[in-house]
Image: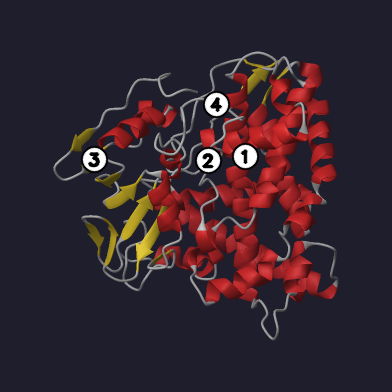
Amino acid sequence: MNEHSTPLPRFDFDHATRHLSLEPHQPAFVQNPYPAYRAIHDASPVFFWEEFGIWCFAGFDDVSRLLRDRRLGRERPPGAPDDGYEGPRDHLKDFDAFASHSMLELEPPAHTRLRTLVNRAFVSRQVERLRSVIEKLAHDLIDRIEPAGHADLLPSFATPIPVTVIAEMLGVPTSMNDQLLDWSHRMVAMHMHGRTREVEIAANAAAREFSDFLRGYVEERRRKPGDDILSVLIAARDGEEKLFDAELISSVIQLLNAGHEATVHQTGNGVRAIVAQGGDPRRFFATQEQTVATAEECLRFDAPLHMFRRYAYDRTEVAPGVTVNAGEQIGLILGAANHDPAAFASPGKFDPSRADQKNVTFGGGIHFCIGAPLARLELQVALKVLFDRLPALKFAEAPRYRDTYHFHGLESLEARW
C-alpha cells in the first residue's frame, strides 16, 4: 500500500475551528486511510473529529506525549459516556462487569496491582521460550495448505497462530479455538465505531458465556495446577496481594482478546505490505536483524489499531488552544502518528532499513501493551516462515480491508503460489 494507491476520501475541514467531517465508513477511507491522514497532517494534526465528537491527535510527538499524560486515563469517570454511548446500560451488565476489572480500563492503584501480577507471565525471557513452539506451528500450518497451491491466509495461517499460542499459554484446550474466537470477536465489536444495539447484546452474551466457562476452568486449575498462565495467575502474589476471581477472569479474557485479535490483523497487513514490494520476499528475512526490522516496519506501516481513546480527569489543556473538560475523551490516531511526515522520512514508503524506526502501535505509558513481546515474536516468526516456505506467494485477488474502524484489518487474504 502507498498513500496514493486509492482516491482521497471525502472530507470537509474548517481551518478556523479545526473541525473535521470525515465519515470513517466510506470505502475510500476503509481501504486506505493514509491519504486522509496525510491531508490531516497538512491541515492540522490537532482537530475535532465531528463523527466521533472528540478532539483528536495525529502527530507522533503529540500522541506519544498524551499516551503518557497522567491527567488522562482509560478508566471511565462516573457519569461519563462510553465512547459516545449514553443511556441505560442494563443490557450491558455482564460486559460492564468484565470491563470493570480489566487492566486496560483501570488506572492506578488498581491498574498497577493487576499489571504487576499479570506481567510476570509476559516478560521477554518467558516469551522467547515460545519461539520454537511458534515456528513448529507455522510450519505445520503451511504443510497443510502448501499442496493445494492456494489458500485464504487469514483463517488458515494468520488466525491459528496467535489463538493457539495464547490458548496453550492459558491452559485452555486448543479444541476450543473456534469458541474462543467467537467470544472474542463479539466482545471486541463493542469498540468499533457505529456499533448497534444488536452488537451490544451479542457482546454482553459473549462476556457472560466466556466468564461462566472460565469460572469452572479456574476451579479445575485450582484443584490441578499446570504449567500455564492460568495456574500462574491463580498462584500469583505480590507481597500480600493476589488476584480476586473477578479480576482473574477479566485478565484472562483480556489476554485472549488482545492476544490474538490485533496480531491476526497485523500479520495479514504485514503479508500484504511485503508482497506489494515485489521481488523475492526472502530478502527481508535474510538475517535475524533484518527479520526484526521488517516486523517493526510492518507495525509502523499498517498498524491493526488506529484510534486509542483517553478520558480527561480534570479540565485539561491538551494542546495550545484546546481544552477538554473532566469526563470528556480525546482520540489518539495511532495509524496517523505512524505516518507523520514530521517524524518519518517518506512515511508512505515501506522501508525496514529506515533510520527513524519507531511506532506507537502498542500504545505507551502505563497502558503500553503487556503482550507486545509475544506479538512481536509471533509476527517475526510467522512472516519469516511463510515467505521462506512460499517465496512465490502472490495474491489471487486484491486484499480488501474490513469496515471496522478503529480496527484496521483485512476481510480475507486469498493467495496462490
Question: Local crowd at mark 3 within 10 Å, few (<14), some, or many (≥20)?
Answer: many
Q: Name which quarter of the figure residue 333 lies in.
A: top left
Q: What separation in Å lies between label 1 and label 4 (alpha carbons)?
A: 20 Å
**Does 408 sit left or right of 396 as displayed?**
left
The dot on residue 20 is 3
Disc sitting over residue 350 in the figure: 4
The local secondary structure at tag 3 comes to strand
The residue beneath circle 2 is 304
Judge the density around disc 1: few (<14), some (14-19), many (≥20) Cα neighbours within 10 Å: many
Task: Please give the count of numbered marks on the rendered protein.
Answer: 4
Which quadrant is the C terminus positioned in?
Answer: top right
At 79% from the left and 74% from the top, the residue drawn is 222
Mark 4 or mark 3, which is nearer the start of the sequence?
A: 3
Which residue is depicted at the point 78% across and 35% down? 138
Gap between marks 3 and 1 measured at Cα: 31 Å
Alpha carbons under labels 3 and 2: distance apart? 23 Å
Residue 291: image tag: none
- Residue 216 shows in the view: yes
Rendering coords of residue 180 (x, y %): 66, 51
Q: Position of residue 275 (x, y in %)?
A: 62, 20
When the figure is inspected, residue 156 is found, relative to residue 105, above or below; the finding is: above
From the viewer's side, name the closer residue of 161 and 5: 5
Q: Which mark is residue 264?
A: 1
Q: Amino acid at mark 3?
A: Leu
Taking the image as drawn, is residue 85 in sight? no
- Is 168 drawn above or below residue 401 in the view shown? below
